[in-house]
Amino acid sequence: MEMTTMTGLEVHIVQLPALRVASVYGFGASPELLAWEKLLTWATDKGLLDEPPTYRIFGFNNPNPTVGSPNYGYEFWISVGPQIESDDVAIVKEFPGGRYAVTRCVGVEEISGGWQALVAWLVDSGHGQADHQWLEEHIGAVGQSPQRWTIALHAPIAG
């Protein structure tokens, strides 16, 4: 893992491995909370949140907000094993992985500023932006209030 610091922002370059994930979705003025509740209920029913945690949780806008509408979508992924299949709540997908520039923030209110700083870092870094999915990894979020979540922001980079 490569680590660089520019303009006070600590950024790690990581290669996310391919993952099998279950996807849940929320749409509305606060889709993150809708999708989060759906994910927690579904994953709890499947026993996926039992100790010790072996899962990873990622999220991203889908679709992004648009001018003139308060509604947008948010999709959560939780890594799952081969025993989990798609159902009426979650769709199982294969994520191919990819190379990312990653920084962290604490609290959902810090996400926007974190993304702005990471995008500025990316522009100045010389790393080219790639086309794979931008991701927010929610670390230790289960059982925590959103103001205390640690979020690892993953910007896709080429190479």
Image (spheres, helix red, strand yellow):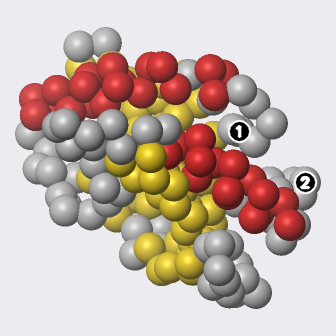
In depth, the one of 73 and 83 nearer the eye is 73
- The reply to whether residue 34 is visible in this rendering is yes
Give the amino acid at mark 1: Gly
SS class, disc 2: loop
Give x and y (percent) for residue 56. Answer: 63, 56
Residue 27 coordinates in the image, percent (x, y):
45, 53
Left or right: where 84 falls relative to 79: right
Q: Position of residue 112 (x, y in %)?
A: 35, 25
Amino acid type assigned to the residue bearing label 2 in the image: Glu
Q: On screen, 130 above or below 29?
A: below
Q: CA distance from mark 1 to mark 2?
A: 12 Å
Q: Residue at x 59, y 41 (%)?
A: 33
Tag 1's secondary structure?
Answer: loop
Farthest-out residue, top: 8
Left or right of 72? Residue 82 is: right
Badge 1: few (under 14), some or many (20 or more) residues near its Cα, within 10 Å? some
Binning the other alpha carbons within 10 Å of mark 2 as few (below 14), some (14 to 19) or many (20 upward) gives few
Residue that label 1 marks:
140
**The quarter of the displayed image where residue 130 is located:** bottom left
* Dot 1 and dot 2 residues touching (CB under 8 Å): no
Q: Image quadrant of residue 45? A: bottom right
Above or below for 114 versus 2: above
> In which quadrant is the C terminus drawn?
bottom left
Give the number of the disc on residue 51.
2
Residue in the picture at 57% in, 80% down? 92
x 63%, y 66%: residue? 79
- Tell me where residue 42 sits by quadrant: bottom right
